[in-house]
Image (cartoon, rainbow, N blue to C red):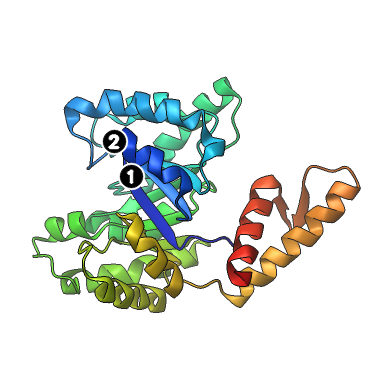
């Protein structure tokens, strides 16, 4: 489905001030982080903070995601137990190495969603290892709830034993492969972060490279990176046409007192209408 995924902004899950500020940010996805930005001794308090924040989901302009700890961390079960609730739009799973990890997580989600009467929650596996790169297509294809692959450059380079540079030469093949695998599976791809907050020119150039590789958007780590990222990742004509069709079809469905309808054989409901309106608002603003 078409949607705006220009920016995925990570917000430390243990920082109440940053979480509060995120309410007014215009990133397409706000992702509260339970992984790298949260020390081990603060994981539990961060889960509780995010859990409370999700009850006020309507106060956030963007889609709201949470990044859990990795499948091999031993902490993901505790993460899911707290964050799987009404108010969450999706989950980023870091350091996914193979499709089996997503299959196991999906089983847990199905159980929690059934108990808590929730709709299926989207997943975005993050590819951050040599094994993950090799298995990227299978990971993207492992579940209908996988909406996009996220590229994580730093852990990949560490896995390869390669030093980081701004141009990430050591990850060139991996960076090129991930959007191809994602597209082949009918999913989106979101590029890795740009670390230098003072280099806006470099950020814009890096976004252009990512767009030309087939990425729909970029992971970012500071609100100041939103505008530059959005300027590069414009909606495509196909996405604009999809948005117009959604608005028209849903308006007709509401007149017939239906809560959902179909476009191109796929069901659409309120969440798709919200995404369509956001996309059209963007191109007319």
Closer-to-camera residue (162/207): 207
* Tag 2 near tag 1, CB within 8 Å: yes
Residue 34 visible in the current orientation: yes
Q: Residues within 10 Å of mark 1 (few under 14, many from 20)?
A: many
Q: Is residue 106 left or right of residue 86?
A: left
In this rendering, the answer to whether 155 lies above or below 53 is below
Alpha-carbon distance for marks 2 and 1? 8 Å
Q: Residue at x 27, y 57 (%)?
A: 152
- Give coordinates of residue 253: x percent, y percent: 84, 50
- Give coordinates of residue 96: x percent, y percent: 31, 47
Q: Quadrant of the C terminus?
A: bottom right
Badge number at residue 154: none
- Give coordinates of residue 91: x percent, y percent: 43, 42
Q: Quadrant of residue 218?
A: bottom left
Closer-to-camera residue (162/33): 33
Closer-to-camera residue (214/140): 214
- Give coordinates of residue 80: x percent, y percent: 40, 29
Q: Quadrant of the N terminus?
A: bottom right
Q: Residues within 10 Å of mark 2 (few under 14, many from 20)?
A: some
Residue that numbered label 2 is attached to: 15
Residue 33 visible in the current orientation: no
Badge number at residue 11: 1
In this rendering, the answer to whether 19 lies above or below 179 is above
Residue that protrudes farthest toward the right in the picture: 256
């Amino acid at each position: 489905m078409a949607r705006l995924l220009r920016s995925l902004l990570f917000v430390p899950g243990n920082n109440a001030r940053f979480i509060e500020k995120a309410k007014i940010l215009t990133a397409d996805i706000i992702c509260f982080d339970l992984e790298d930005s949260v020390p081990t001794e603060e994981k539990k308090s961060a889960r509780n903070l995010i859990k409370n924040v999700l009850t006020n989901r309507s106060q956030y302009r963007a889609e709201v995601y949470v990044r859990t700890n990795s499948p091999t961390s031993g902490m993901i079960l505790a993460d899911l137990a707290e964050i799987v609730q009404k108010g969450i739009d999706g989950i980023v799973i870091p350091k996914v190495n193979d499709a089996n990890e997503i299959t196991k997580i999906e089983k847990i989600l199905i159980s929690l969603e059934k108990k808590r009467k929730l709709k299926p929650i989207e997943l975005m596996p993050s590819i951050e290892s040599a094994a993950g790169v090799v298995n990227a297509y299978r990971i993207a294809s492992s579940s209908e709830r996988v909406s996009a692959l996220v590229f994580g450059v730093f852990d990949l380079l560490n896995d390869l034993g390669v030093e980081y540079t701004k141009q990430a030469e050591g990850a060139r093949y991996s960076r090129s492969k991930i959007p191809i695998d994602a597209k082949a599976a009918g999913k989106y791809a979101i590029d890795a972060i740009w670390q230098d907050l003072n280099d806006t020119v470099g950020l814009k150039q890096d976004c252009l490279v990512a767009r030309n590789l087939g990425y729909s958007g970029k992971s970012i780590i500071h609100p100041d990176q939103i505008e530059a990222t959005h300027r590069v990742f414009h909606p495509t004509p196909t996405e604009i046409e999809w948005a117009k069709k959604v608005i028209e079809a849903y308006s007709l469905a509401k007149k017939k007192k239906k809560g959902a309808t179909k476009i191109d054989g796929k069901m659409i409901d309120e969440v798709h209408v919200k995404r369509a309106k956001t996309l059209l608002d963007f191109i007319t603003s």
